[in-house]
Amino acid sequence: MARWLPRSTDLTRFCQKLNRVKTLEDDMMETSFNRCLSTIDLTLLGIGGMVGSGLYVLTGTVAKEIAGPAVIVSFIIAGFASLLAALCYAEFGARVPKTGSAYMFTYVSVGEIWAFLIGWNVLLEYMIGGAAVARAWSGYLDSIFNHKIKNFTETHVGAWQVPFLAHYPDFLAAAILLVATAFISFGAKVSSWLNHVFSAISMGVILFILIMGFVLAQPKNWSTQEGGFAPYGLSGIMAGTATCFYAFVGFDVIAASSEEARNPQRAVPRAIAFSLGLATGAYILVSVVLTLMVPWHTLDPDSALADAFYRRGYAWAGFLVAAGSICAMNTVLLSNLFSLPRIVYAMAEDGLFFQVFSRVHPRTQVPVVGIVVFGLLMALLALVFDLEALVQFLSIGTLLAYTFVAASIIVLRFQQQNGDVPVPAAGGQPNPEPHEGPSGGELKEYESFSDKLQLVDRDKSKEQREPGQLKAAFEPYLEFLSDFYPGEVVTVAVVTLMVSAICLCSILVFGNTHLHLPTWSYSLLLVLFSLGFLLSLLLIWAHEQQHSTQTFQIPLVPLSPALSIILNIYLMLKLSYMTWLRFAVWLLLGLLVYFGYGIWHSKENLREPRPQRVSARYVVFPGGSLEERVQAVQPSSQPATGLPDTDTDDCKR
């Protein structure tokens, strides 16, 4: 029976396959796409992705059913958490200007299977986002005509009473997605032009809502007679925050479009900052005027803003808001349909997804196959699914992507750059102890003289340390960590930090409600997991990190990504168990695709493994002239034939 068990070497090789990272090209600006997008284009693309159905639908839905007027606080917390994640995306987008967004960022730093799962969830995120916006678009248009479209469909087609499905098939939502798919397939320039037009109309409508809304505001709608400012308490605010995350997924669109930016190193960070700041301000102000215009418990969750103006006697204003909101939702549809095929293209180009999706049309320079196929899938989702179920499902995929990108920032920041990574000797062990040179200096061995020549001057300066190495100030206290390769301790600490964050947030969310822990054990577990989180954070901070002035870098690493991780995990645990159940089913489907196709067709799998046997070695005597002291040495693993005895004697001397 033992012969059927896998050998340890096979298991090791299999785990290496799962965790291999993507090899980036030397020229990352080279692409088959058309680099035609400016900072303004990317900013408007981000605003169009964030200011749409979230502004016109979620504000009313969360205010009435989850948080009340405290939806304002929910948007503030969601905006802060999104800012932490957005800074991580900005650094990656400037550093790795390739399409793929969170999938690409995870692939180059964490590993292949994790990147695939993130990409798989990002696909679902964009599909659900497009479908949810299409249903909101249909609902607003229907409200303009006094719900005649809905009544006609229910009368002549029929209604459903199935959980998680819509009460009736929304043919209008499916139709608008098909029309948007056709426009996206014409190319990036056409998509950008349409986005500019709809974004201008949307911002004009938002200004009108704010001015008119503050004129009609009634502070009594926040009074205790109407239920108060936070009728659902802190729990409702945090639950509303998790749902409000749907509103801020637009900056991810900017990162996904970085391969089509003219100057991604500067355009991507600026566009993310501008778009997120403007969107957050718009959400907060619109939430204020909406809950002040009418009592929060009387809001219509399907068309809150338009209905509020109708009820205050301004029918013309409600009509204008409804028409403007449709234009805003068009920008979200364009953003989702613009980004989704590019994520699919990145996965297919790497061999992890079906190769047909990596085809780029030679004239329009867009992945037409991905646009058409996933446009049809979006239309199908919009036809049959309910908006609320789609929105909650979207939040968990977004939060998971944010979490992995934040962890990837820490791992990549403490890794050595290409060319500085030490190459272990055969068997994965560190290189042999350096021999002693004739002048008392160290005799170091290198596998490639041309590759390692740059390290000679660095060896003379012991104060300069590479990223991932222990800081000199901590070496006397943590000397036992010096034996590890640079970055290894940081990677383990990141894993420990994430595990501690999961346990800590689980106690906070479920400790008193589901687990019914006594006070002493609840407090003890909080202290233990908090210490684990803080110690992991300090251990990461005790190591050197990369410092670059060429591209944007998120400040306060590892603190900023760590705060993003723990906040994202907390918000994920606040989602309903049915959301987690559907998410688990989707993950299982993704694993079937990966192990059935991706792992075998991965381009990293086709690359030749690096040779472990040293073919030539060189020795450098720091004490003498570099040109005079470089001599070839026969590797000990090879026979001595072919090497003159005089050379061997010289090296031994």
Image (tube, rainbow, N blue to C red):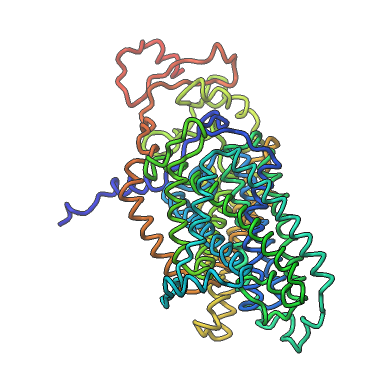
Q: Nearer the viewer, residue 25 or 631?
A: 25
Horizontal side of 605 relative to 529 (left or right) equals left
Left or right: 337 in relation to 561: left
Instruction: Work out whether residue 490 or residue 406 is closer to the camera in this orientation and state it.
Output: 406
Position of residue 433 measured from the top left corner of the image (x, y, whole percent): 47, 33
How many circles with numbers are drawn on the protein?
0
At a point 65% along the width and 50% down the height, the residue shown is 46
Residue 412, image quadrant: top right
Task: Locate the N terminus and report the quarter of the image it occupies.
Answer: bottom left
Residue depicted at x 57% and y 64% = 136
Q: What percent of the width, then of the height, locates residue 137?
A: 58, 62
Would residue 481 be visible to someone looking at this image? Answer: no
Q: Can you give x and y, in whole percent of width and height, for residue 184 in the image?
A: 54, 44
- The percent coordinates of residue 587 (x first, y second) are 40, 60
Q: Is residue 546 left or right of residue 152?
A: right
In depth, the one of 640 and 224 nearer the eye is 224
Vertical comparison of 500 with 429: above or below: below
633 or 13, which is in the foreground? 13
